[in-house]
Image (tube, rainbow, N blue to C red):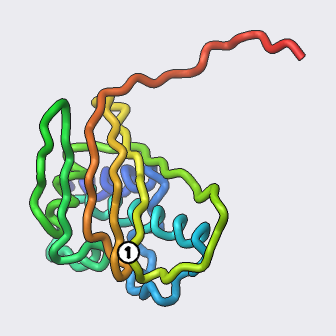
Amino acid sequence: MRVVVNALAIFAFVESWGVSGAAAQDISNPCHSWPSNSSALFNVLGERVVNAASRAALPVVGDEKGLDAYVAKDADFDLGGGDVGRPLVQRSSGFRRLMRQLQADRYRFDGWDYMSKQEDPCDTHEVTVEFSSRKIGHRAEVKFEFRGGVIVKGKGWLRSTTTGDFPITPVYR
C-alpha cells in the first residue's frame, strides 16, 4: 500500500510540474538531428534541461541511465548561496543534489529573441533556466552548458524571492 501511495505522489508531482511526458520521451535522440536554427535550438536545449531536471527531482530507482543520457560523466554542478559558492558532486548525482536543494516547483527560460543563425547543434551552447520554489521562497538562475548534446556544466546562485499578484491599478486609455 505504501509503495502505491509513494508512486501516486511521484506521479502527481511530475504531472503537476507539466513534464509527465518527459519520462516517456525518447532521450536517445542524437544532437545531430536537432534543429540548426539558433532560435529553435535554444528551445530544444531549454526543454532538455527541464526534462533532465524532472528526472533528477525523482527518487533514484535502480540505475541512473535515464538521467545519464542528459548529463556528461564529468559534468560539474555548483549552486552558490549568500556569499559562498558551493560546488556539488559531478555527474548525474550532482544534478540530483542541485534539484533537491532547489525543491523547484516551477521553471522558466527565455526564448531566443535575437537574429537567428545556423549553428552546429552538437557544438558548445549555453542556456539559462530559472527554477523556483514557492514552498521555500527561493529561486536560482542556473546556466547550463551543453557540449555534444549533453549537459557538461550547471552553475547557479540561490536567491530568496517574493512573488505575488500585481496590484490592480486603473488604466486610462
Residue 82 falls in which quadrant of the image?
Answer: top left
Q: Position of residue 127 (x, y in %)?
A: 43, 60
Q: Is residue 29 above or below residue 12?
A: below
What is the tally of numbered marks visible in this picture?
1
Q: Is residue 80 above or below residue 50?
A: above
* Mark 1 burial class by Cα count in 10 Å: few <14, some 14-19, many 20+: some
**Which of the two residues, 77 or 60, is positioned nearer the viewer here?**
77
Residue 169 falls in which quadrant of the image?
Answer: top right
Q: Position of residue 172 (x, y in %)?
A: 85, 12
Q: Is residue 159 above or below residue 20?
A: above
The residue most toward the right is 173
Task: Identify the residue shown where x is 60% and y is 79%.
Answer: 118
Q: Secondary structure at mark 1?
A: loop
Task: Identify the residue shown where x is 54% and y is 72%.
Answer: 41
Q: Position of residue 100 (x, y in %)?
A: 21, 48
**Which of the two residues, 43 or 124, is positioned nearer the viewer here?**
124
Task: Identify the residue shown where x is 19% and y is 58%.
Answer: 77
Q: In the image, what residue type sits under mark 1?
A: Thr
Instruction: Name the quarter where the C terminus is drawn.
Output: top right
Task: Identify the residue shown where x is 24% and y is 54%.
Answer: 6
Q: Is residue 61 left or right of residue 134?
A: left
Q: Position of residue 159 (x, y in %)?
A: 29, 32
Q: Is residue 53 left or right of residue 6?
A: right
Instruction: Name the quarter where the N terminus is drawn.
Output: bottom left
Q: Is residue 69 left or right of residue 82?
A: right
Which residue was labeled with disc 1? 124
Q: Is residue 113 left or right of residue 44?
A: right
